Amino acid sequence: MSNYTHILVGVDLSDEANHVIQRANALAAASKAKLSIVHVVEPLTFAYGGDIPVDLTEIQDQLQTKAVEQLRSMAKANNISSENQHVVTGQPVSEIHALADELNVDLVIVGSHGRKGLALLLGSTANGVLHGAKCDVLAVRVKD
């Protein structure tokens, strides 16, 4: 097994995310690697009710704030420093790839429900991260 120097763990802030973070933390400790954590908030688009546009900026800001709070709490429970916590807005797969490149990580860890067949072919976040990453990717199995 390689000795990794910087590991990025992507989380969805669900209850299962703590399991993924704990596995990432153990691997980072064994490799003496830096551990960073990321959550991607997907952007809300403008919704239209007839001819009247509805601005969802305030709701998007609330989602962002809540995500920062939840990630901070998860990171604190797992001893991940604030400078290694990232909440970004965008499409999860592309944002995880971009952050992995920016931080020069050599391993990305994501949770996976282990779906098979069409569910996998239609694309989960874990599958998307795996197929576009420039570094190793580890999918940690979480309960369905």
Image (spheres, rainbow, N blue to C red):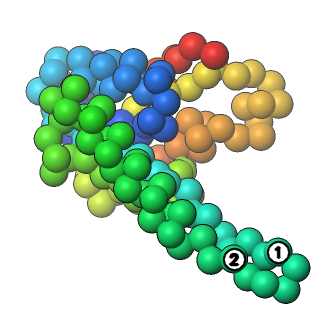
* Residue at 73% over, 82% down: 53
* Residue at 78% over, 84% down: 52
Which one is nearer the viewer's eye here, 71 or 108? Answer: 71
- In the displayed structure, 137 sits above or below 19; it is below
Q: Mark 1 or mark 2, which is nearer the start of the sequence?
A: 1
Q: Is residue 113 left or right of residue 49?
A: left
What amino acid is found at the position of numbered circle 1 in the picture? Gly
Judging by the rendered image, the residue that carries numbered circle 2 is: 54
Secondary structure found at label 2: strand
| Viewport quadrant of the N terminus | top left
Q: Gap in Å between the C-alphas at discs 2 and 1? A: 7 Å
- Residue 37 image-quadrant placement: top left
Task: State whether residue 134 appears in this view.
Answer: no
Judging by the rendered image, the residue that carries numbered circle 1 is: 49
The label shown at residue 71 is: none
Which one is nearer the viewer's eye here, 71 or 90? Answer: 71
User: What percent of the width, then of the height, locates residue 99?
Assistant: 36, 56
* Residue at 37% over, 23% down: 18
Secondary structure found at label 1: strand
User: What percent of the width, then of the height, locates residue 32?
Assistant: 11, 27
User: What percent of the width, then of the height, locates residue 4?
Assistant: 22, 32
Number of marks in the rendered image:
2
* Residue at 30% over, 60% down: 102
- In the displayed structure, 46 sits above or below 108; it is below
- In the displayed structure, 29 sits above or below 128; it is above
Q: Is residue 99 left or right of residue 139?
A: left
Which one is nearer the viewer's eye here, 61 or 126? Answer: 61
